[in-house]
Image (cartoon, rainbow, N blue to C red):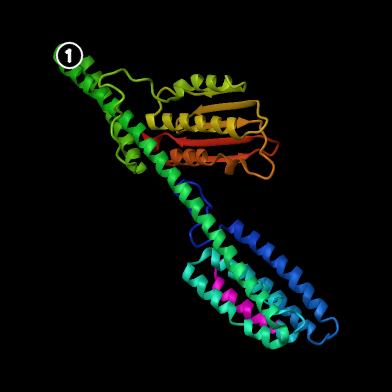
Amino acid sequence: MDRSRRQPDGTSTAEGPGELSPRTARRLWWGSAALVLGVLGTAVLAAGAEDGRQLPVAVVLVLAQAGALRWQTRAPVAVLAANAAAGLAVWALLPEVTLTGALLAAQVTLCVLSATRTRRLSAGALAAMCLPAPLAFAAGGGPAGVTVYLLAVVLAWTAGQWRRAQRERTRAETRRAVVEERARISREVHDVVAHTLSVMVVQAGAADDVFTDRPDQAREALRAIETGARSALGELRLLLRAFGPDEEDDESVEPGAPREPGPSLARLDALTDTVRTSGMTVHVHREGRCDGLPAAVDLAAYRIIQEALTNTLRHAAGADQVSVRVTAEEECVQVTVTDNGRTAQGGSRAAGAGRGLVGMNERARLVGGTVRAAPLPGGGFEVAARLPVERAS
């Protein structure tokens, strides 16, 4: 995916510490170029109307600044220097254009540099942008002209710092959600492995008891042990992938006490029944057999459906129907949850779902699968997951 990177939550095209996603960079270029052409271009045309000799050169310099903004996310320092030089040239050609207006493109680049580069580098760029301030005073702008210019530069730098802090906070929240989800997954995988090993111990004892008298039954027990061992190894690999912290056993459960059945696609009807109690109509469609799935894939599919249904209840405005489809194939399990709700105006359902989508991506990633969550063209929202069976078995 080109310059985009895969983040801890398993999603892609997320913005990294010092870069923007390609889509964000393109939108930023279009917006900033339109701003420069609209504001600075208009000012240059108005100032050069009386002196046509300087106007063509000034127009070329304005277009060059707008074009240079294309690379402001990749090389903001170089673009800042180029736009500052071009802006000063425009101001020298047409003094009627204020210094603040002539350096508009440089101020935009300073904002981007402040948002995407280190604070030390952005502080140096801020100091450099303040150097032309005495020129405004010498050209007759007076204290007011100097104040306006310095205020514009500082505001541009501050806006970049605010955006940087906002992105860092978002990344911190995502990392925290991933850590919490991994801890939850590690506990669940621990329970699955412990159950599998307990069954292996029982099968080994049974094989030893009937080894002489009933060798066929002993062979069946040994084959069950082999299958359980392979499954346990797969679950342990997932546990190591999760990097979850060690957790102490729940002291509220007495040793030897019967445990409730764990999350599984076999309990999908019970899960959807709880959603129906809220008044939502739930349609469930199954294809293939789900009873022989690896425990980790079974658990991941169940949790993804659970999170998708929760997101529907919380974030799907006006939704009254949701469809759950589970297709178990030989190579993978495909899960699709679709509702008929609408996204709130001015917001994104994917953004509103928050940690739910982070958890779904993390669970799918740990079994080698993928999750796609997006609104549908005709209305509604769909969560589709593909979980390969072989990688977790």
> Which residue occupies the extreme front position in the image?
143
Which residue is at the front of the view, 62 or 127? Answer: 127
Kindly identify the residue that appears in the image at 65 percent across and 64 percent down: 29
> Which residue occupies the extreme top position in the image?
213
Residue 76 painted magenta: yes
Residue 386 painted magenta: no
Binning the other alpha carbons within 10 Å of mark 1 as few (below 14), some (14 to 19) or many (20 upward) gives some
Say which quadrant the C terminus sits in. top left
Q: Determine the secondary structure under disc 1.
A: helix
Kindly identify the residue that appears in the image at 70 percent across and 83 percent down: 142
Which residue is at the front of the view, 16 or 104? Answer: 104
Q: In this view, does 371 lie to the left or right of 317?
A: left
Which residue is at the front of the view, 151 or 89? Answer: 151
Kindly identify the residue that appears in the image at 63 percent across and 43 percent down: 348
Asked if residue 4 shows in the view, the reply is: no
Q: What stretch is highlighted in magenta?
A: 73-90
> Circle 1 sits on which residue?
210
